[in-house]
């Protein structure tokens, strides 16, 4: 489904205004050149399904491969698209293309077949001294950008116009726009969150002793698609037992064992916006006392961190709050020894909690936007959406860990909207307390005749 054009037009207007402001500040006109990309190769001649670069989709709404967008504030044609042209022979294989006419109908001031990019770009860049473009990712693309800049320079030697002399990564400026979510974006994130909660409930029902990690993965991914999601926003993680201690475990091919926990980290992408949720639950429906003790610590750390997701609070306070509760918990469990303040200062907890407590969330699971402004942790503002995801990972082979706790890996992750009245947990419908998890994972019906 093509999203409505007017979702993207105001973003383009704002982007052009920001490029203009930067031009005034640096006394050199700024332009931006953004590449949508190709479908990534899987193997042989098979490709993964194409999903546009989030920055390009955010500004253009274009859904087909190979699009290139050029933004030139102040020009007669400020927004130009280069797109795959109509091609009936190719369209039989890969579907109808909007083509140049489609680009104009969707708001471009000018549009050309993408094959004309190299011959036109040099002239189009004349007059712009600063070019926002991602370099260093694709040598052939870099060469095209530099060739166009050189051709622009040749002409400029005659007509005296500015030509690109400075290259700037576009992500910082667009990231600032993407960081604060509009009402439409929040509505999509709410739907992504709702589907994701349903998928986790299905995972909990599926993951009984003897089920395979991939069966749980299929229950999750099936739920995403069945409700109109695009699929997982990142590869679904299902880790039984000590596999939960591997942070991005995606092989998902072992059996779930009676007495183990299962960690599922999965989020549905819905209309380009993804959720990101982790739950950890007992495969047989009952936490052991040791599992429960660790679980309650992680849960308390998460609650302390969520409570800091408030307007005006520096981003890093969430992490600091989680680390304090986790470190105290590691002392209480007999895993760390010493004073909590000193253990935090010496980062002793990092052996068992080695990742951050969250990240921005939106079109990308690790979404765009700066966490620091200069040397200051950024203050939270209404419309920011972030994850809160503390965990503890107690390796099987660590003899500082009392035996009862070895091989336990627990992460609890929710998606939180910062609002003027406090944190709103978008994924609150997903069971999380010990009692709720034991209720939904209850396997007693399975053993009845
Ligand atoms: N699912 C990746 C993450 O939690 O950051
Ligand atoms: Mn996450
Ligand atoms: Mn996650």
Image (cartoon, grey):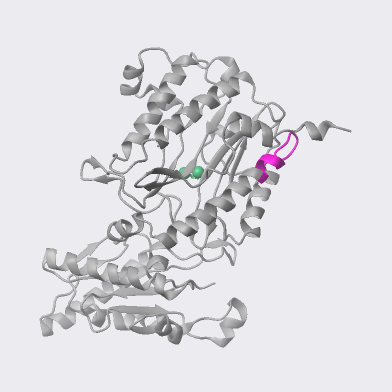
Magenta span includes 356: no
In which quadrant of the rendered image does the C terminus lie? Answer: top right
In the image, 62 versus 433, the foreground residue is 433
Seen in the picture, residue 33 relative to 322 is either above or below; the reply is below
The tally of labels here is 0
361 to the left or right of 217:
left
Seen at 53% across and 63% down, the residue is: 41
Residue 422, picture quadrant: top left
From what the image shows, is residue 385 above or below residue 329? below
Relative horizontal placement of residue 383, taking residue 164 as reference (left or right): right
| Residue 77 x/y as whole percent | 27, 83
The location of residue 351, given as percent across then percent down, is 44, 25
Q: Between residues 205 and 371, which one lies in front from this camera angle?
A: 205
Q: Which residue is at 52% across, 20% downward? A: 398
Q: Which residues are magenta?
A: 202-213
Q: Is residue 363 visible?
A: no
Residue at 17 percent across and 83 percent down: it is: 155
The N terminus sits in image quarter: bottom right
């Amino acid at each position: 489904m093509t999203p409505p054009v007017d979702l993207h037009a105001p973003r383009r207007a704002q982007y052009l205004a920001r490029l203009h402001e930067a031009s005034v500040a640096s006394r050199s006109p700024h332009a931006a050149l953004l590449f949508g990309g190709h479908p990534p190769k899987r193997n042989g001649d098979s490709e993964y399904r194409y999903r546009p670069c989030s920055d390009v989709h955010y500004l253009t709404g274009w859904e087909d491969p190979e699009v290139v967008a050029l933004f030139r504030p102040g020009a007669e044609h400020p927004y130009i698209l280069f797109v795959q042209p109509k091609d009936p022979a190719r369209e039989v294989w890969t579907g109808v293309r909007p083509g140049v006419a489609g680009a104009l109908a969707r708001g471009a001031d000018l549009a050309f077949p993408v094959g004309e990019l190299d011959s036109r770009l040099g002239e189009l860049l004349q007059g712009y001294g600063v070019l926002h473009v991602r370099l260093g990712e694709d040598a052939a693309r870099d060469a095209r950008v530099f060739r166009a800049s050189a051709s622009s320079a040749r002409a400029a030697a005659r007509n005296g116009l500015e030509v690109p002399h400075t290259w700037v990564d576009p992500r910082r400026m667009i990231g600032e726009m993407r960081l604060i979510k509009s009402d439409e974006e929040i509505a999509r994130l709410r739907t992504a969150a709702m589907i994701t909660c349903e998928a986790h409930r299905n995972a909990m029902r599926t993951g009984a002793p003897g089920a395979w990690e991939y069966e749980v993965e299929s229950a999750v991914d099936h739920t995403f698609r069945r409700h109109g999601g695009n699929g997982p926003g990142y590869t679904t993680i299902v880790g039984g037992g000590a596999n939960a201690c591997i942070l991005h475990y995606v092989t998902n091919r072992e059996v779930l064992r009676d007495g183990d926990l299962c960690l599922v980290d999965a989020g549905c992408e819905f209309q380009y916006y993804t959720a990101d949720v982790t739950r950890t639950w007992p495969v047989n429906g009952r936490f052991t006392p040791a599992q429960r003790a660790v679980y309650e610590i992680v849960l308390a750390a998460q609650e302390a961190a969520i409570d800091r997701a408030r307007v005006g609070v520096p981003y890093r306070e969430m992490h600091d709050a989680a680390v304090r509760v986790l470190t105290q918990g590691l002392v209480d469990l007999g895993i760390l020894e010493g004073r909590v303040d000193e253990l935090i200062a010496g980062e002793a907890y990092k052996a068992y909690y080695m990742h951050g407590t969250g990240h921005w969330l939106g079109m990308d699971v690790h979404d765009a936007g700066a966490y620091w402004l200069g040397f200051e942790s950024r203050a939270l503002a209404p419309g920011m959406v972030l994850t809160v995801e503390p965990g503890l990972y107690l390796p099987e082979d660590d003899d500082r860990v009392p035996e009862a706790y070895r091989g336990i890996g627990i992460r609890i992750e929710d998606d939180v909207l910062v609002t003027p009245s406090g944190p709103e947990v978008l994924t609150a419908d997903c069971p999380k307390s010990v009692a709720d998890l034991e209720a939904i994972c209850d396997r007693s019906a399975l053993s009845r005749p």
